[in-house]
Image (cartoon, rainbow, N blue to C red):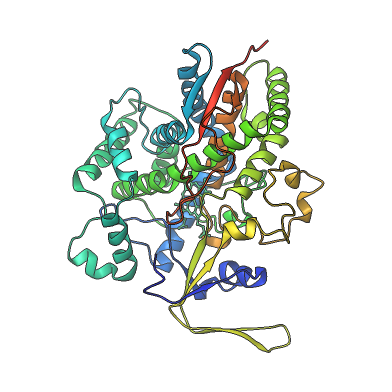
Amino acid sequence: MYSFIRPQLIVKDLSLIKLICIKDFDYFKNRTASISNEVKNLVWLKDQKWHEMRTTLNPTFSSSKMELMFNTVSDCALQFVRQFQKSHGMVEVDSRDVYARFVNDSIASVAFGINVSNCGNEFLVTTRSLQKSSLGRSLKVMGYSILPRLMAMLNIRIYPEKCLDVFTDAIKETICRRDQNVSFRMDMVHVLLELRQGSGIKDDREIGEEFSVPDEVLVGRQRTVALSDEDMVAHALVFLTAGTETTSTLMCFMSHELAVNEDVQKRLRNEIDDTIRRCDGKITYEALVGMKYLDMVISESLRKWPPQDKLERICGKDYTIRSEDGDICVVLEKGINTVIPVYAIHRDPRYFPNPEKFDPERFSDENKSNIVPYSYMPFGLGPRCCIAARFALLEAKILFFHLLHKFELVPTDKTVSFPRLYGRTISQRSRDSISIGLRSRIVL
Ligand code: HEM
């Protein structure tokens, strides 16, 4: 999209990728998604401010916070599964649509503290309108990334004011209720409120149990800035926009792979049945994160269908890359856009033999050490990697746990063998609707 404005360099060399994303981070600025503290216009934070905000927000997504949010997300997943249990026989669903609804509900629930099914349609309709891509909005986002000051001076808004009012009212109402102790729930609003009040920050356990979570998520744990109510609205909105399409895309493609790979689905269902038996019928957080095959299936879905198909970094200063013996390899000029083609690397047979095959075994304990460093990056790399990787994995794991406990996923007449992708969207989306049949299981 930006290639006609900035020269682009497509980087496939893994050592160069490491350099751009991790090592020489100061030279390479992020290009796409970012945390923002400006609710009206999605202004990317400048480096120092970004760093302060990122270290402030990191604890929101630590493993210990995920454990605390587990019940809230699990309730959303159970509610989602129950709606299909009401129908008899096989239910055919357009998975893109139903997962988008689930992810919306769960992020609304944890980031805005509201129960979508109780709060009427307005929130949902507004969220949908926010997520519809339009040329006008893409141009505004582009304008903000190129000329942020001018765009702000002209008071050009990325989101319609009415739409922002709905979100602002929703979160302010929740903050008010929580401040007055009218309601309590362990969710992102609660963690953000703790940050605002300066309590509960010390973070503790940071275990990268899940294979897909990049270690760099652990970068910087110090809280450095105080949050205002306005900041909280902005963050909730960024979480909603950054987290919905990516996570529902993962769920969509994972469903497809499970429906067409019966053996994988059967093995996963056996793991689910064993786990629920061991937990006396009620899944716990420890049991969920201990499910190895579930983690392997999700990791392989993210390998074959990475929801964000490329990473982008702009070179912030003229930069010379030298080989180990000092020879000049590449000279990058300030302003060049380096693009890391995640999708292409994930399907490169040098790193993932037989890449079209959906094979969770690549991520088994025995095999995962063979994965070449920097060849697998569904959540990005380095200090700018996805802040909420753990939350996204939690949502996907708990959803598939409850879904496969009650249903078999089967192909329908409309299921295509090889979903085609849109070429020009930010996250990887299927051009064909991904139709899945949900056939009730007899659970003993
Ligand atoms: C399967 C689901 C998801 C995938 C595959 C994904 C992927 C990514 C990627 C590739 C990046 C850019 C990393 C880089 O440039 O190195 C990113 C950034 C980001 N993601 Fe995610 N994401 C997912 C879910 C979520 C969720 C659920 C949320 C929020 C609740 C979220 C919030 C963010 C934010 C705020 C950033 C910007 C971080 C920063 O600027 O420091 N993502 N994500």
Q: Residue furthest left?
A: 154
Task: Choose between 119 and 441: the one closer to the eye.
Answer: 441
Q: Which quarter of the rendered picture does the C terminus lie within?
A: top right
Please report the residue visible at 62 percent of the width from the left and 26 percent of the height from the top.
Answer: 284
Residue 19 screen position, x and y as percent: 61, 72
Task: Choose between 7 and 41: the one closer to the eye.
Answer: 7
- Residue 180, compared with residue 357, is above or below; it is above
Q: Residue furthest front?
A: 413
Apparent side of residue 54 relative to residue 173 in the rendered image (left or right): right
Apparent side of residue 376 relative to residue 237 in the rendered image (left or right): right
Q: Residue furthest right?
A: 366
* Quadrant in which residue 118 is drawn: top left
Task: Choose between 422 and 87: the one closer to the eye.
Answer: 422
Residue 320 screen position, x and y as percent: 57, 85
- Residue 323, compared with residue 20, is above or below; it is below
Residue 157 screen position, x and y as percent: 22, 56
